[in-house]
Amino acid sequence: MTMSPSQIELADASDRQVATASFDRNLVVTAGAGTGKTTLLVDRLVHLLLRNPQPLKITEIVALTFTNKAADEMKLRLRQRLQAFLDVQLDREAANDAEAKTKSDAEALIALYQLSKDELDNRIHDALRNMERSDIGTIHSFAA
């Protein structure tokens, strides 16, 4: 039996979960290319925006990287992830694996933070509206 990439447990899965949903400290992620840094940071940003209590506004978050390409990729993936949560229909059967994962992730966030779908959507709309005002970028652009 062949396992899909989403079914393979990573050796550092518990460390990734701590990095995603621990809010009592700032976080620095260092790892080689292609190891999932951007995915982890996008997951952390989603949790910061949607958590209860004390969700953060996107304009209250600083997420920095070294290159414009990496910063643009982080913003793009965050925008896509948030939009997918808006688009998901919780009361319908998922049409494909990607939609099923998004639905499962949205349901998990709703349960974890005791949100209604409307509350989730409102926080996401606010984040998307203010994305270009956020400090998601490079260290150089932030320092400037």
Image (cartoon, grey):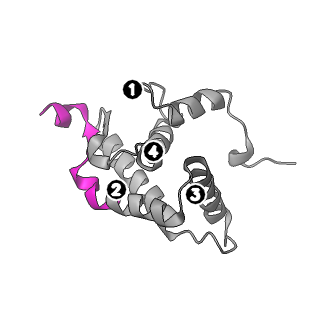
Structural distance between the alpha carbons of marks 4 and 1: 15 Å
**Residue hosting label 1:** 26
Neighbour tally class for label 3: few under 14, some 14-19, many 20 plus, Cα within 10 Å: many
Callout 3 touching callout 2 (CB < 8 Å): no
**Marking on residue 94:** none
* 143 in magenta: yes
* 107 in magenta: no
**Magenta-drawn stretch, dominant element (helix, strand or loop):** helix
At 33% from the left and 59% from the top, the residue drawn is 126
Please indicate whether residue 57 sits to the left or right of residue 44 in the image.
left
Residue 141, image quadrant: top left
Residue 128 in the image: state x and y as whole percent: 33, 60
Q: Amino acid at mark 3?
A: Ala
Q: Earlier in the sequence, mark 1 or mark 2?
A: 1
Q: Which residues are magenta?
A: 127-144
Structural distance between the alpha carbons of marks 3 and 4: 14 Å
At 56% from the left and 30% from the top, the residue drawn is 18
Neighbour tally class for label 2: few under 14, some 14-19, many 20 plus, Cα within 10 Å: many
**Residue hosting label 2:** 127
Q: Quarter holding the C terminus?
A: top left
Q: Earlier in the sequence, mark 3 or mark 2?
A: 3
Residue sitting at the far left? 144
